[in-house]
Image (cartoon, grey):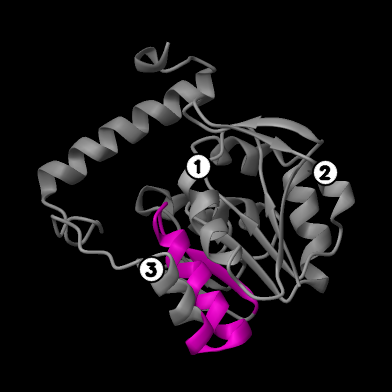
Amino acid sequence: MQIAIGLYDGFAALDAVGPYAVFANLPGATVVFCAESAGRVTDEDGALRLDVERSFHDLPAPDVLLVPGGTITRRLAEEGGAIVEWIRAAHPTTVYTTSVCTGALLLGAAGLLTGRRATTHWLAYHHLRRHGAEATEERVVTDGKVMTAAGVSAGIDLALTLAARLQGPAVAQAIQLGIEYDPQPPFDAGAPSKAPAEVRAAVTEVMAAAEARMRAGTPDPARR
């Protein structure tokens, strides 16, 4: 089974690496990172650089397709481009087409979410609805062969859910134990319905500023 994780400059690192840690332990699976062209791809913080050896052209028909999110997905979803075309072309033959966080906007741009239930980062629900999806706060949503995860860390949950669907709960549980994924966060503020209002407001302000900088092409001053 071939699992392709599609990347682009500006992807959110954990969105991709979290699921990879699960898929890399799935018996019989070959996990391949790919991008528009072979070469170096940089995450949204500019600190993590991956040397990708395969292009989208090299992987036209993966069994499982996964795309991570990142602030830049808002623009990629509006403009289209190589990753959206790859998703659209590969989807008819996938076993599962999946996304983490705002990677769901790329599925939407490819026309895959119309009339489907889906999830994404809570600050992007309105973007998801523009693509005809029914946005929900659920951690992982499966609608047909399209599977979407909420923000960032939810990608691990998606990968374990998918592992169970592909090879059964025992395999998924063994992978979970192997990576010792046993979340016990120090605060119960990991979803918008749980977080205090002032925390939601602070995060909303930071994310809105990041999106504004992205659209203006202005670097984050904290990362200069």
Q: Are marks 1 and 2 in contact (CB under 8 Å)?
A: no
Circle nearer the N terminus (3, 1): 1
Q: Name the residue under label 3.
A: 139
Q: Mark 2 points at which residue?
A: 55
Name which residue type carries label 3: Arg
Q: Mark 1 points at which residue?
A: 13
Q: How far apart are marks 3 and 2 (CA)?
A: 30 Å
Q: Identify the element where label 1 is drawn.
A: helix
**Residue 104 drawn at (x, y percent):** 55, 56
Query: Which residue is painted at 17% across and 61% down in the image?
Result: 194
Q: Does the image show residue 102?
A: no
Q: What stretch is highlighted in magenta?
A: 145-171
Q: In this view, does 45 lie to the left or right of 84?
A: left
Mark 3 or 2: in front is 2
**Residue 111 drawn at (x, y percent):** 70, 60
Q: How far apart are marks 3 and 1 (CA)?
A: 18 Å
Q: Is residue 7 above or below residue 3?
A: above
